[in-house]
Image (spheres, rainbow, N blue to C red):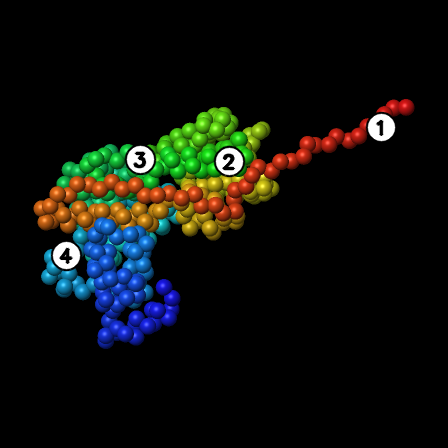
C-alpha cells in the first residue's frame, strides 16, 4: 500500500468521508470481504485481514453506527485481564487487541491483576462492567481461580498461550513444546553441544512445555544434558541477568544460551558484553516471542516468532463470533486454534568458535 494509491482513493471519495467501498478499493478486495473482516467472520486469510486493517487505518474509516445498530450489531463488551512481567509481550498483545477491537465494534475494558494477588477481586471488578466475554493472556490463562470466577458469571472466555486449555473455553496458542525443540535442534545443528537454557516463570504452563521441548532435542541429538545448564528465570529482564551470570560463571561455560523469552535473552546479551564476550563469536544467544525488543538490541536476536499480535486478534474474533452466536441462540462451541511459529535468524547465533590449542613456550634442548 503506497502513498499514491491512498491519495487516489481519497480523491475519489464522496464528500471526503470514506465508505466500505473505499476501504475495499484500497485493500484490493471486495466490499463483501471487508464486511466479513469487520464482523469477525471466519474463512478470511490473515494476510487479507491485515490488508483491510491497514486500509481502515489509512483512511480513518469508521463504520456507520446507525446502520450497524439497525442490523442488530450492538457493541460487544470484552474484558481484558492482564498480569505479565514482560512489557514487550504486553505491548505486542495490546496492539493486536486494540486493532481488532476497533474493527469488530468491541468495547474493551482493561483490568490489571497481579497473579496470585487478589485475583478474584480484580476478576469480579472486571465482570461487573456487564461484559459479554473475557480474554485472558498468560499467566492468568492458567489460573483456575480466575477461570472458575468467569464460568460462574456465565460469560465465555478465550485464553491465549495456555498449555492445556479446558474444553469449555476458547483458546489461541502455538505449540510451545515443538517450537522450543525446533530452536534447540537448530543450535545443535550449528555445532553447539553445551547449550544453556533459561526457564520461564513457573506459574505459566508454556514455561514447562518449552523446557520439555529443549530437553527432548538434547536427548535426541545426544548433546550435553547436565543439570547445571538449566537455570530458572521469571520472564523478566532482571531474572535474565541473574540466570545468565550463573550460566557464564560455570567452569565449562555453555557455547550457546537459549532463553525462554526475548527479555531474558536480551539480558543474556548484556551480561556477555559486560564480560567481554563477543555475541555470537564467543556465545550464541537466542530468545522466544520475537517482540520489538528482539530488533532493538545489538546484535539483533535470533528467536522463535510467536505471532503475539495475531493471537490477540484471533482471540477477539473468536470471542465475537461466539457472543454473536449466543445472542442469536445458535450453537456456540468454544474455538481452539493453533497458530504457526517461525524460527527467525538474525545476528546473535553462529557456529561455536574453534580456538587453536594454547602453545607452551618452547624450551631449548640442553646440550
Residue 255 percent across, percent down from the top left? 55, 35
Asked if residue 43 lies left or right of residue 285, the reply is left
- Which numbered disc, 3 or 4, marks the residue that appears first in the sequence? 4
Nearest the viewer among 128 and 345 is: 345
Please name which of the two marks, 2 or 3, marks the residue nearer to the observer. Answer: 2
Q: In this view, does 38 lie to the left or right of 280?
A: left
Residue 355 position in % (x across, y down): 65, 35
Q: Distance between the residues labelled 1 and 2?
A: 44 Å
In terms of sequence position, does the residue under pointer 2 or pointer 4 come before the other? 4
Quadrant of the frame with the N terminus: bottom left
Q: Which residue is drawn at 73% across and 32% down?
A: 359
Q: Which of 318 and 275 is in front in this view?
A: 318
Image point (30%, 56%), residue name: 48
- The disc, 1 or 4, on the residue closer to the chain's N-terminal end is 4
First reached walking from the N terminus: tag 2 or tag 3: 3
Residue located beneath label 1 in the image: 364
Amino acid at each position: 500500500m503506497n502513498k499514491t494509491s491512498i491519495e487516489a482513493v481519497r480523491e475519489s471519495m464522496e464528500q471526503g468521508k470514506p465508505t466500505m467501498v473505499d476501504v475495499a478499493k484500497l485493500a484490493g478486495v471486495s466490499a463483501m470481504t471487508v464486511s466479513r473482516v469487520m464482523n469477525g467472520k471466519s474463512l478470511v486469510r490473515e494476510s487479507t485481514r491485515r490488508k483491510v486493517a491497514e486500509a481502515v487505518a489509512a483512511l480513518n474509516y469508521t463504520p456507520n453506527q446507525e446502520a450497524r445498530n439497525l442490523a442488530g450489531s450492538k457493541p460487544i463488551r470484552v474484558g481484558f485481564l492482564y498480569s505479565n512481567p514482560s512489557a514487550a509481550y504486553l505491548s505486542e498483545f495490546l496492539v493486536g487487541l486494540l486493532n481488532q477491537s476497533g474493527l469488530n465494534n468491541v468495547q474493551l475494558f482493561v483490568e490489571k491483576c497481579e497473579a496470585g494477588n487478589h485475583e478474584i477481586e480484580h476478576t469480579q471488578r472486571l465482570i461487573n462492567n456487564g461484559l459479554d466475554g473475557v480474554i485472558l493472556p498468560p499467566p492468568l490463562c492458567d489460573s483456575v481461580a480466575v477461570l472458575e470466577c468467569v464460568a460462574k458469571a456465565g460469560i465465555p472466555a478465550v485464553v491465549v498461550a495456555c498449555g492445556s486449555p479446558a474444553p469449555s473455553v476458547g483458546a489461541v496458542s502455538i505449540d510451545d513444546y515443538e517450537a522450543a525443540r525446533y530452536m534447540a535442534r537448530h543450535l545443535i545443528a550449528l555445532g553447539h553441544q553445551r547449550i544453556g537454557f533459561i526457564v520461564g516463570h513457573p506459574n505459566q504452563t508454556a514455561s514447562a512445555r518449552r523446557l520439555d521441548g529443549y530437553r527432548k532435542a538434547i536427548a535426541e541429538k545426544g548433546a550435553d544434558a547436565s543439570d547445571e545448564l538449566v537455570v530458572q528465570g521469571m520472564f523478566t529482564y532482571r531474572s535474565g541477568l541473574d540466570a545468565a551470570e550463573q550460566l557464564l560463571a560455570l567452569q565449562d561455560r555453555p557455547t550457546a544460551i537459549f532463553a525462554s523469552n526475548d527479555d531474558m535473552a536480551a539480558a543474556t546479551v548484556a551480561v556477555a558484553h559486560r564480560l567481554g564476550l563477543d555475541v555470537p563469536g564467543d556465545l550464541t544467544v537466542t530468545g522466544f516471542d520475537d517482540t520489538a525488543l528482539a530488533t532493538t538490541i545489538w546484535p539483533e536476536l535470533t528467536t522463535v516468532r510467536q505471532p503475539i499480535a495475531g493471537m490477540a486478534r484471533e482471540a477477539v474474533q473468536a470471542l465475537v463470533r461466539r457472543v454473536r452466536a449466543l445472542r442469536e441462540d445458535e450453537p456456540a462451541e468454544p474455538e481452539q486454534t493453533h497458530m504457526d511459529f517461525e524460527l527467525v535468524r538474525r545476528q546473535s547465533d553462529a557456529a561455536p568458535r574453534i580456538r587453536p590449542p594454547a602453545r607452551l613456550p618452547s624450551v631449548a634442548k640442553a646440550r
